[in-house]
Amino acid sequence: MTSGASDEFEEFDIVVIGAGISGIGAATYFRRELPGKSLIVLERRDNIGGTWDLFRYPGIRSDSDLHTFGYEFKPWRHENAIADAPLILDYLRETVDENAVAGLIRTGHRVLRSEWSSAESTWTLTATTQDPYGAAVTKTIKAGWVFAATGYYNYDEGYSPSFPGSEDFEGVLVHPQHWPENLDYSGKKVVIIGSGATAVTMVPAMAKGPGAAGHVTMLQRTPTYIMPLPRVDRVALALTKLLGERRGYAATRIKNIWTEHFVVEGLRRFPRAGRAMVRRENIKRLGKGFDVDKHFNPPYAPWDQRLCAAPDGDFFDAIKSGDASVVTGSVARFSKRGVVLESGEELAADIIVTATGLNLQLFGGMPIEVDGRRVDVADTIAYRGTLLSGIPNWAMAIGYTTSSWTLKVSLLCRYFIDLVKHMDAHGYDTVVPVAVPGMTTRPIMDLQSGYAKRGEDVLPRQGPVKPWRTMMSYPEDAKALRGPVTDGNLEFGVRSAGRRAAGQQVAHV
């Protein structure tokens, strides 16, 4: 393959990077609310959908209900409130078609670097794609704004710790992020290492139904809180029947937002009561003879890490039926036949799945430069959870970790729209958050999960108070992000004339 570049470039007011659930939502909001702005969406992969197209492991689904995980402007019509990936992907494709967003999306465009010029008040993005003959082509795209909807994990590589003896294992070793097409596990002994949402999803999917494994073992080093949730929201169905599709959907969203808010706040304020509640539910599902305290009694409080959902209790049903089991212990090494624990016990396996998590990465790992200076994102502080200190005209979309991801993204998009409209009304061309010198900071993700801890050195920080504190509560954010657009932490720039005029005045608002 050959590589080529051109001196020609395209120019847009707003470039959205990423065509997953965040990018598609952002493009829809911006197209509606900022009709005078030129807009494009760059997606590195050949398909839209992000996570919901990339991951192909058995049973992949959302842990959040689709009445809040879906967009506020597009009702979720399927009866399953907790839905599998194919249904979510269909929903995203419908969104693209119904809102005329397809023409804005360019798939197969990977942004390699982003460079800001204060002299031009413009971002220059370098992207690579392919021409119709498959040859690599480099493109230059200029933008007034970049809205990064890339998520926060590495699409190329999942997290897989080094296990001693892994080269000795004679079976199939696979990470869920790179699930082999047509992997046949029917009748096989499967060991899934991990106890997060991915493992909890895969256990019942692989243990039941056509092509089921002979037996599935979930091997966990530390227990996880797992709660059964109804797959179908009967109240949502009733509200839809009573109020109609759109009003019923809106009413269900409000119900679920506040229900989840009170549950999370209740578990955090009263962790002992929360732990007891989860324990009672686990015993109810598994029976009094099951050692719940050994396998489902984590050493941390509820919501120090995100709770895992089991739709209709499918995870517990698989264990109770004997089709699956849980083993709590640490891996000593792999053997030819499976996994050897530190206790000396050996778990036989034909297939080992390392559901050990994700590697965090922002913006696809691309370098960001401001006036020729490389910016380390980990040194920046998030302003209102979307702008970054010291980086002009750059917004990011990171959703909630303790609630439905999309709820936060919708609020961030609305704040972005209000900010752009404010700048247009006052003739501003640039804006950058300026942090208070010496501000104390902490990680932006207030979770004790392994992936959050591993990613602290690649993610922005947050401050101690608003607007530098990143909130994980929709009711709080709804007030903060729908309030006044400006405060003393933003520095606005005004050019005298033209996009590339050199003169610039500064206003603190």
Image (cartoon, grey):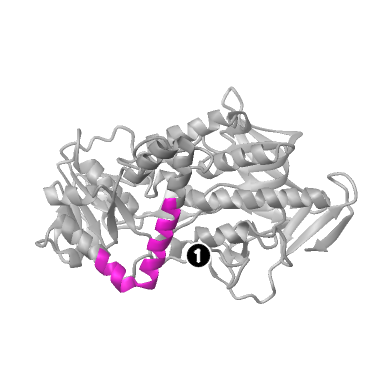
> Residue 258 falls in which quadrant of the image?
bottom left
Judging depth in this view, the residue of 417 and 475 nearest the camera is: 475
In this orientation, does residue 215 appear? yes
Residue ID for mark 1: 456
Residue 219 drawn at (x, y percent): 23, 57
Residue visible at 75% across and 52% down in the picture: 422
Where 101 sits versus 379, above or below? Answer: above
Give the residues drawn in magenta, as a range. Answer: 255-277
Type of amino acid under label 1: Glu
The answer to whether residue 18 is visible is: no
Main secondary structure along the magenta-highlighted residues: helix
Counting other residues with Cα less than 10 Å from the Cα at mark 1, is it few (<14), some (14-19), or many (20 or more)?
A: some
Q: Position of residue 354 (x, y in %)?
A: 31, 51
State which quarter of the image contains the N terminus.
top right
Q: Is residue 189 magenta-colored? A: no
Work out whether residue 134 or residue 82 is closer to the camera in this orientation and state it: 82
Q: Position of residue 290 (x, y in %)?
A: 12, 61
Residue extending furthest front?
A: 242
**Residue 271 within the magenta-colored segment of the rendering:** yes
As drawn, 323 above or below 9:
below
Q: Quadrant of residue 110?
A: top right
Q: Image quarter for residue 84? A: top left
